[in-house]
Image: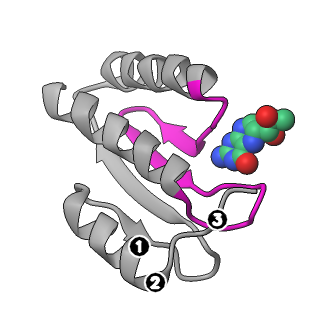
């Protein structure tokens, strides 16, 4: 079974990601993004959805108009794993192009 990241490893990964932080009340990481409008936000979400489907690893997210808040956690272990880091890296890479 996949392993949760250690506290040290998570801290290291968070420093290398862009705008991600630990969630206070549960074992997960989150990032908030803001786009020009709904069209941009939904285009971004579509790209993340395709990646998530390829990875079989899916975000929890909340969208209102141009804002998207994403929470990543690996349900299988109820914690943060390399899968979350991989998806977070992808999100950062396409957010930069936005
Ligand atoms: N997404 C996330 N975020 N965590 C998981 O553990 C997970 C998932 N597991 N997407 C996958 C799907 C699993 O439920 C299916 C059965 O492969």
Stretch in magenta:
55-81
Gap between marks 3 and 1 measured at Cα = 12 Å
Give the left or right position of residue 70, taking residue 95 as reference.
right
Neighbor class of circle 1 (other Cα within 10 Å; few <14, some 14-19, many 20+) is: some
Q: Circle 3 is placed at which residue position?
A: 3
| Numbered disc 1: secondary structure | helix
> Is the C-beta separation of discs 3 and 2 under 8 Å?
no
* Residue 7, label in figure: 2
Q: Position of residue 62 (x, y in %)?
A: 56, 44
Gap between marks 2 and 1 measured at Cα = 5 Å
Quadrant (top left/top right/bottom left/bottom right) for the C terminus: top left
Gap between marks 3 and 2 measured at Cα = 12 Å
Give the left or right position of residue 15, taking residue 38 as reference.
left
Quick one: label 3 or label 1, which is nearer the N terminus? 3
- Residue at 61% across / 74% down in the picture? 27
> Is the C-beta separation of discs 2 and 1 under 8 Å?
yes
* Residue 59, label in figure: none
Give the left or right position of residue 59, taking residue 43 as reference.
right
- Residue at 39% across / 74% down in the picture? 9
Q: Position of residue 22 (x, y in %)?
A: 45, 74
Where ligand 1 lies, by quadrant? top right
Residue 96 drawn above or below residue 70 = above
Residue 23 drawn above or below residue 81 = below
Q: Circle 1 is placed at which residue position?
A: 10
Q: Quadrant of residue 86?
A: top left
């Amino acid at each position: 079974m996949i392993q949760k990241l250690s506290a040290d490893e998570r801290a290291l990964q968070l420093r290398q990601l862009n705008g991600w932080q630990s969630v206070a009340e549960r074992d997960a990481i989150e990032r908030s993004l803001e786009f020009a409008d709904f069209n941009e936000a939904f285009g971004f979400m579509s790209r993340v959805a395709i990646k998530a489907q390829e990875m079989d690893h899916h975000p929890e997210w909340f969208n209102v108009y141009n804002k998207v808040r994403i929470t990543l956690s690996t349900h299988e272990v109820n914690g943060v794993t390399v899968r979350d880091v991989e998806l977070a890296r992808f999100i950062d890479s396409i957010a930069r192009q936005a």
